Image (cartoon, grey):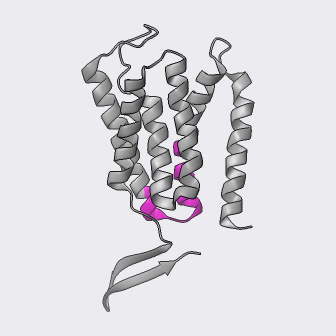
């Protein structure tokens, strides 16, 4: 089975999981809220899973850095700004955490592995942002800021994966470079 075929199956599995989890969520929550809650976790999980499936240790490290920077920046801004949500539920609307995490994962997949993975991930991340505005949890500025934070963190920490890795090595008999490739 090819790598592309396996990734396609993973997307189908994630979709099926989403459909199974919707009825299990709190009856008061809308389907959009439930989908956004699931996708804010599922997108980063898929991005992280891709690094392990591709045996991409450097990509895994880059994912951790970009995800940590996204979460830290989002939490610092939420704590410092105290912007009320449109629904009045609390005062930590800016920026949207759901959107920042979803867009961090989408930008990671696009930046590291290419647009063939980025386009579907960006579509799902956009849905997360849309649902947050549509359900009055955020306004468009909150969502836009969250998206920019996630994208910026991934573009800062993530480099494209070309399937070739050069690793410095050192041993008792000298130093060198180890070249490894995946295809």
**Which residue range is magenta in the image?**
42-60
Q: Residue furthest left?
A: 80
Establish if 55 lies above or below 155.
below
> Is residue 16 toward the left or the right of residue 74 in the image?
right
Q: Residue furthest top?
A: 88
Query: Could you tell me which quadrant the C terminus lies in?
Result: bottom right
- The magenta stretch spans residue 49: yes
Location of residue 140 in the rendering, given as x and y in whole percent from the top left corner: 42, 24
Which residue is found at the position 46% from the left and 63% from the top?
57
- The magenta stretch spans residue 150: no
Location of residue 3 in the rendering, given as x and y in whole percent from the top left corner: 66, 65
Which residue is found at the position 49% from the left and 38% from the top?
102
Which residue is found at the position 66% from the left and 62% from the top?
4
Q: Is residue 58 visible?
A: yes
What secondary structure is the stretch in magenta mostly built from? helix
Location of residue 43 in the rendering, given as x and y in whole percent from the top left corner: 55, 42
> Is residue 174 toward the left or the right of residue 160 in the image?
left
Which residue is found at the position 70% from the left and 59% from the top?
6
Establish if 108 lies above or below 167.
above
């Amino acid at each position: 089975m090819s790598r592309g075929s396996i990734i396609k199956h993973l997307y189908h599995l994630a979709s099926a999981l989403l459909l199974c989890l919707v009825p299990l969520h709190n009856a008061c929550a809308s389907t959009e809220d439930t989908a956004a809650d699931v996708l804010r976790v599922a997108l980063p999980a898929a991005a992280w899973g891709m690094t392990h499936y591709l045996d991409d240790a450097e990509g895994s490290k880059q994912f951790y850095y970009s995800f940590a920077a996204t979460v830290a920046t989002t939490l610092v801004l939420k704590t410092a700004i105290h912007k009320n949500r449109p629904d009045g539920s609390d005062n930590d609307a800016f920026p949207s955490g759901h959107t920042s995490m979803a867009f961090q994962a989408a930008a990671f997949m696009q930046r590291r592995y290419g647009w063939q993975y980025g386009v579907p991930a960006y579509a799902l991340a956009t849905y997360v942002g849309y649902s947050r505005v549509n359900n009055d949890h955020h306004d468009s500025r909150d969502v836009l800021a969250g998206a920019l934070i996630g994208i910026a963190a991934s573009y800062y920490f993530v480099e494209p994966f070309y399937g070739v890795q050069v690793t410095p090595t050192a041993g008792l008999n000298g130093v060198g470079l180890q070249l490894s490739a995946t295809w």
